[in-house]
Amino acid sequence: MATMVANETFTGNPRRQLTKLFSVSLKLTVPDEPNVEPLVEPGKFGDYQCNNAMGLWSIIKGKGTEFRGPPAVGQALIKSLPTSEMVESCSIAGPGFVNVLLSAKWMAKSIENMLINGIDTWAPTLSVKRAVVDFSSPNIAKEMHVGHLRSTIIGDTIARMLEYSKVEVLRRNHVGDWGTQFGMLIEYLFEKCPDTDSVTDTAIGDLQVFYRKAKLKFDSDQEFKEKAQHAVVRLQGGDPVYRKAWAKICEISRNEFAKVYQSLRVELEEKGESFYNSFIPHVIEELSSKGLVEESEGARVIFIDGFSIPLIVVKSDGGFNYASTDLTALWYRLNEEKAEWIIYVTDIGQQQHFNMFFKAARKAGWLPDDDQTYPRVSHVGFGLVLGADNKRFRTRATEVVRLADLLDEAKTRSKDALIERGKDKEWTLEELDQTAEAVGYGALKYADLKGNRSTGYTFSFDQMLSDKGDTAVYLLYAHARICSIIKKSGKDIDELKKTGKITLNHAAERALGLHLLQFAETVEEACTTLLPNVLCKYLYYLSEEFTKFYSNCQVNGSAEETSRLLLCEATAIVMRQCFHLLGITPVYKL
């Protein structure tokens, strides 16, 4: 290796640090190829491997190089690698792969450093400073159902991962609080309660029933339909009586949404469709001045390459639609909120709509042509929640499943399982209730997040609340067990963190240590790919590595007790951070 010593800190991100080392090595090995990026990833035959040799050979072989094939390039990369205390040894495998073995001493030091300075020292640093995550976004006057579960949970986890990675996140709830349905609702409200000043929650009652009755009348009564259409015009024109009725309906809906968000511990700031109304004419004018908007069949549209239908931005009746609002919201987020990355979390069925309006924004020059360059936009699409029949998950009455009911049932089933295990005799009622909630809601969230979001998943309480396999219940048990091991030792773990040392002499200790150190790069990957399942997989494998460690290495009462207790504590801390990022509340006893 080269004699130059890398200036490094214990950031707890080996992949990043090795990438820096190989970046130096590449510049020394092939100074005439300055644009080659290091390809470092977890290895099959080492802890990590650098995969540049073969690609480099294909670039330089026709340029009179001194090297005689990829293995020779790999050897040169090792020779030019700066000396570093993190690297124990390097070797060549196959056609030039450079296998890297990390120093166990360096790994131990890195974990000790995290125990002293906290898990935030392992947070990845992303190149983006401010992002908007647009998620949940239910429609006013309609109940949140199982479909909103996915957007809410996936969006919250993406926001949490970005926030942990030091990104300022604007969590936006783009609620459907505007549109033609409000004419129907307001007109029905006036019929039920002519004195609009005294409209109360009880006058409206159950908003879902109210909505269905209004819709029924709208579909069957022509005179009412005309009144409702007139009401839309009055509302959009700013009539204070209509605005007041609209605000009351929105408020009742908001209060219902708030209960669900509170249960799920999800924070959102509402900026609904109505917020952008006053900006729409300006945005349409800007797009028109750039020659993007054309007349077509009475409507104003933007034609987009690759799509047979245009994007309608002003309807033939002069009204605005989703595209006008979405383009305006994007303009606002880029220009007023100065967001560099805008992420939309909706079902995959809306993919075409997003593709079209993203292309329109590129055409307008709002976004760069390269979709990886900032400012950038991403559509995080997700599949359906399916029932046991492999069709869209519904109740027996073929209605969509209310989200509030789903949460209640998850908690009830979780509580029943705890009572069955006699926990009602050991714990206070409050402990029982809090644990049932943490486990029930955690199970619901983890089942939604653990698969690749782009595919649907089959909803099954029995599977998600099982204490075996890849479930939140199993992982929460694993965490509680680690806490119990530490407690049984009788040692002051905070004191041990300050004075104790970690050794990774046993293969199972080393494997656990390596997995712990791969936490930061896993969060980084989950952020950049917008795939929460990457973090779920890491968490499950962490619990598996811990089980292997605990089966092979006695903790309490062993000669290595201090070191192994610190490994237990490091595992518990990383598990808790994973739970936090997934929106799951950890439990300390089960």
Image (tube, rainbow, N blue to C red):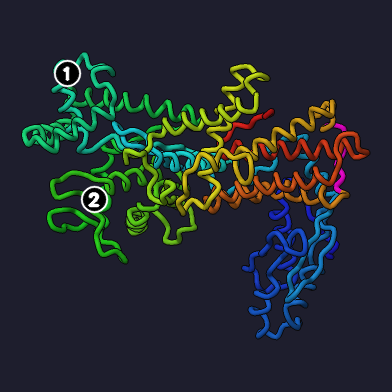
| Placement of the N terminus among the 4 image quadrants | bottom right
Q: Nearer the viewer, mark 1 or mark 2?
A: 1
The location of residue 354, given as percent across then percent down, is 36, 53
Q: Please name the residue that numbered disc 1 is placed on.
A: 193
The location of residue 516, given as percent across then percent down, is 73, 46
Q: Nearer the viewer, residue 15 or 181?
A: 181
Q: Residue reaching furthest front?
A: 420
Residue in the image at 23% along x and 38% along y:
179
Queried whether the magenta region covers residue 500, the answer comes back as yes
Residue type, mark 1 in image: Cys
Q: Please name the residue that numbered disc 2 is placed on.
A: 313
Residue in the image at 53% along x and 45% along y:
449
Q: Is 543 above or below relative to 116? A: below
Residue in the image at 69% along x and 68% along y:
51
Residue type, mark 2 in image: Val
Residue in the image at 76% along x and 50% along y:
514
Q: Which residues are magenta?
A: 498-504
| Placement of the C terminus among the 4 image quadrants | top right
Q: Earlier in the sequence, mark 1 or mark 2?
A: 1
